[in-house]
Image (spheres, rainbow, N blue to C red):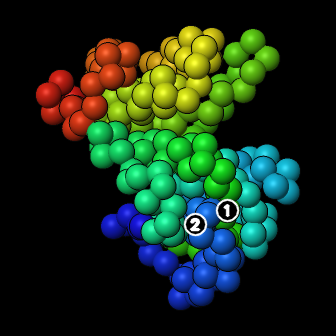
Amino acid sequence: MMDDDAEPHPSALQELMRVADDPANIYGSLAVNKGDVSWLTRVLDPPLGEVEKADAVPERAVVQSLPFLGFLVHRSLVERIGLPDAGYFIAADDVEYCLRAQKFGADIIVAGKSWIEHPKSRPYKVQVLGCTLTCLVLSPWKRYYDTRNRLFIARSYYGLRLFTQTIPGSLVRLIAALLTEPRKLAQLYAFVAGFIDGLLGIKGKRHEFWRIQ
């Protein structure tokens, strides 16, 4: 699977297939932009933590999740876990799919030398009570889906952490957006709409319903 704004390097498929040796796992290319990773990549094995530079990602590594960019999944695994949840529409649908696969015993493996060019996300860090939270610069309509879909994932996979981590983290992200980003009222409205739909479990393409731009 690949986004329409992704541009694979000439060897991307070859390097991806070099690593993809077990149909029970999910594999993916590394999304890059001018030597940086396009999305912060948390490497679990080897235990490198969050990696920002593309060259720092090993040829093969187990990661927390992968975006739908050069995302390779075998038919046999899809038959076991189903298709991605179209109700997410955009944002975190790939994270949910990785979590679902992990429940079935799959590892999520990045092919660190399989590069796909993709516009870079705009993350920034916020420190709260000794904890570091990664936030993203987002337009209001994307803020809606980011907020809503984080709650969907927490409701499905995190148990009590929905209340102890996800909801407090969402409020911190809102405060950070209101402090650092333009269109503050639109950001607040998008957050409230996403929070309501997330708690109520209302899926689908909804930003137009809420008239968020």
In the image, farthest residue toward the right = 47
Q: Residue at x 21, y 32 (%)?
A: 206
Q: Residue 176, position in %: x, y?
A: 53, 21
Q: Amino acid at mark 1?
A: Ile
Kind of residue indicated by mark 2: Gly
Q: Around disc 2, counting alpha carbons within 10 Å, would you say few (fewer than 14), some (14 to 19), or many (20 or more)?
A: many
Left or right, residue 204 beside residue 104? left
Image point 49% across, 66% down: which residue? Answer: 76
Dot 1: within a 10 Å radius of its alpha carbon, few (fewer than 14), some, or many (20 or more) residues? Answer: many
- The image shows residue 32, relative to residue 40, as above or below, that is below
Image quadrant where one finds the C terminus: top left
Mark number displayed over residue 95: none
Is 57 on the left-hand or right-hand side of 46?
A: left
Q: Which of the 4 image quarters holds residue 18? A: bottom right
The reply, left or right, for residue 7 in relation to residue 29 is: left
Q: Nearer the viewer, residue 172 or 101?
A: 101
Residue at 70% across, 70% down: 112
Percent across and percent down for residue 79 are 43, 60
Per the image, label 2 sits on a secondary structure element best described as strand
Q: Residues under labels 1 and 2: Cα distance?
A: 6 Å
Residue 49 shows in this picture: yes
Reading the image, the residue beneath label 1 is 109
Residue at point 32%, 16% (across, down)? 200
Residue highlighted by disc 2 = 28
Which numbered disc flags the more N-terminal residue, 1 or 2? 2
Nearer to us in this view, 41 or 187: 41
